[in-house]
Amino acid sequence: MLWQDHMHCLYLQNGLECQQNAGYIFCRTPLMTSAEEYSERMKKQMELNDAEAYKQMCLEYLVGNSSIPKDKAKALKLFMKAGELGSATAYYDAAGMYYEGKGVARDVKKVDISFKLLL
């Protein structure tokens, strides 16, 4: 499960200030104990239009876990939303899905569009 690979705070993991704790560099959020708790935290961050949370949920939908069913079409939608919110790597990942035909029909035109959105 991907949630186990993450530290308790995505911001701290990525070397950023934790937004949940008003700018404190060291997050005091307790460690997650389950995939369900991880999913709930990511959903709360998604409500705040957090691109990184959208991207992390994409990864969960790609592989599935005990609280999230595997759904590649949903993952693609979330990658595009994460891209709209500023995640260039999400557009890159979406392009990869279109190129490889993972969860969607292989579409070279959409690969090009996704790469253009990167810029």
Image (cartoon, rainbow, N blue to C red):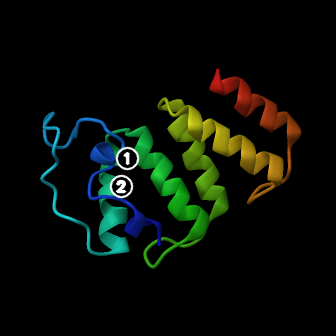
- Most extreme residue toward the top is 119
Q: Residue at x 51, y 63 (%)?
A: 60
The residues bearing labels 2 and 1 have C-alpha atoms spaced at a distance of 5 Å
Q: Residue 108 in the image: x percent, y percent?
A: 87, 39
Residue 41 in the figure: left or right of residue 88: left
Q: Element type at marker 1?
A: helix
The part of the image, by quadrant, that contains residue 6 is bottom left
Describe the element under mark 2 as helix, strand or loop: helix
Viewer-proximal residue among 1 and 113: 1
Mark 1, residue position? 46
Please name the residue shown 54% across and 73% down the image.
69
**Left/right of residue 78 with respect to residue 115 in the rendered view:** left
Which is nearer the eye, 96 or 5?
5
Q: How many marks?
A: 2
The residue at 60%/63% (across/down) is 62
Residue for point 35% across, 55% down: 42
Amino acid at dot 2: Lys
- Labelled disc at residue 117: none
Give the class, few, some or many, for how many residues have Cα within 10 Å of label 2's Cα (few <14, many ≥20).
Answer: some
Q: Nearer the viewer, residue 51 or 47?
A: 51
Report the quarter where the C terminus lies.
top right
68 or 29, which lies in front?
Answer: 29
**Which quadrant of the view contains residue 32?**
bottom left
Instruction: Give yes or no for contact between labels 2 and 1 (Cβ–Cβ under 8 Å).
Output: yes
Q: Specify the amino acid type for callout 1.
A: Met
- Residue lying at the far bottom in this picture: please name it: 66
Q: Position of residue 52 (x, y in %)?
A: 42, 43
| 30 sits left or right of 67 in the view | left
* Residue 29 x, y percent position in the rendering: 16, 56
Q: Position of residue 113 (x, y in %)?
A: 76, 29
Q: What residue does disc 2 label?
A: 43
